[in-house]
Each structure stands twice: as C-alpha cells, then as structure tokens.
Amino acid sequence: MSIAAAKAQHVLSYDSDDNQILVSHLLKISPFAEVPNILTRLQSKYRIGVISNTDDDIISGSLETLGVSPDYVITAQQAGAYKPNLRLFQYAHAKMGVSAAETIHVAASQELDISVCATMDIRSIWVNRRGEKKDDRWTPFGSWRTLRACPRKSTTCNS
C-alpha cells in the first residue's frame, strides 16, 4: 500500500513532502548490532542474498550499513510482488540460480516470510526479537531471539 493510499484509508492529512521524509528515514535504518559480523562470517562460506519487501532506492541506504556487500539484492520492486506473495521468492531464487531446497531463509516475520517458506519448503530461521508466540501453521527450521544464537566458532548457524 502506498503512503497516499494509507493516509486516505485512515483519513490522515497528506503533504507531498511526507514521502521524502519517510524515505529519508528509511534510508538510515541500520541492522541490529550482531548482523554485520554474522554476515561477514557466513559470507566467507556461503552466498548471501537479501530479499527485501521494498524498492531499490529505499534498500540502497540500508545495504551500506550491513558491513558486507550481499551477493544478491532482490526487491519487491524488481519482482513486481510484495511478501507474502510467492512470486517474490520464486523471482529471487531464479535470479540467484538456486532452488528452494538449496536455501536457508533468515527472517523476522512469520506472516511475510516464514509462511512462504513453509509453503515453498524453504528451510527457515525465525529471528523472533519481539518474543512473539509461534504460529503453529508455520514451523521454521530454527528459531532464535537474536542472531547471536548463531554459533561463533562455526561458519554455519545450525543449532
């Protein structure tokens, strides 16, 4: 849903500067503290792909703070589909040249990510930072409160 549509739906005033203000804040979003180190360690052995439910211009600012350059960056804009639409994941796998069985998807959202992983038979790790109750319809491969649970001495994050 666009900003304009959301504001109209909720009867909020809308100023043309609002889009730019929101985008400027989104460009400054930093990863959680442990993420750059974990990604660096994993990238020494695996290809890293980011599947983002956003546009190319919005994700670009966040990528600069990751500490690594992902091998692939796939956005909803590129795929023409937003999570939880399977097309975004299908597009990402095709672009990366991998099958669902060859991937492990690390995600924060049960509804937007883990549900798709269950449908597509993708192994998933749910990073449940907010301590949400697990939805029994979707069982992730693993579930952690933070990525710090990823073993430090290993190059994998299997628990």
Image (cartoon, helix red, strand yellow):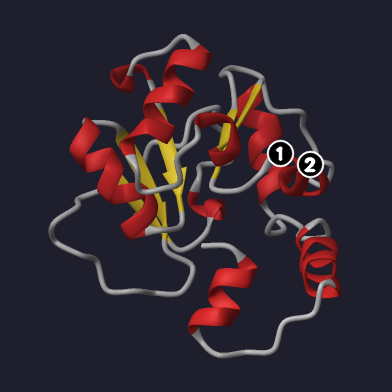
> Disc 2, disc 1: CB below 8 Å?
yes
**Residue found at the very far left of the displayed protein:** 137
In the image, is 144 to the left or to the right of 23? left
Please determine whether, in this image, residue 99 is positioned above or below residue 52: above
Q: Residue at x 32, y 59 (%)?
A: 111
Q: Position of residue 91 (x, y in %)?
A: 44, 23
In the image, is 15 to the left or to the right of 8? right
Q: Nearer the viewer, residue 12 or 154?
A: 12
Check residue 134 in the rendering and tell me which mark sits there, or answer none: none
* Number of numbered markers: 2
Please determine whether, in this image, residue 125 is positioned above or below residue 110: above
Q: Residue at x 68, y 59 (%)?
A: 32
**Local crowd at mark 2 within 10 Å, few (<14), some, or many (≥20)?**
some
In the image, is 76 to the left or to the right of 117? right
Quarter where residue 60 is shown: top right
Q: Nearer the viewer, mark 2 or mark 1?
A: 1
**Is residue 141 visible to us here?**
no
Disc 1: which residue: 56
In the image, is 139 to the left or to the right of 88? left
Quarter where residue 67 is shown: top right
**Residue found at the very far top of the displayed protein:** 97
Badge 2 marks a residue whose secondary structure is: helix
Quarter where residue 43 is shown: top right
**Local crowd at mark 1 within 10 Å, few (<14), some, or many (≥20)?**
some
Residue type (three-letter) at the residue carrying disc 2: Ser
Quarter of the C terminus within the rendering: top left
Q: Residue at x 52, y 15 (%)?
A: 96
**Is residue 73 visible to us here?**
yes
Q: Position of residue 127 (x, y in %)?
A: 45, 56
Disc 2: which residue: 60
Residue type (three-letter) at the residue carrying disc 1: Asp
Please determine whether, in this image, residue 76 is positioned above or below residue 122: below
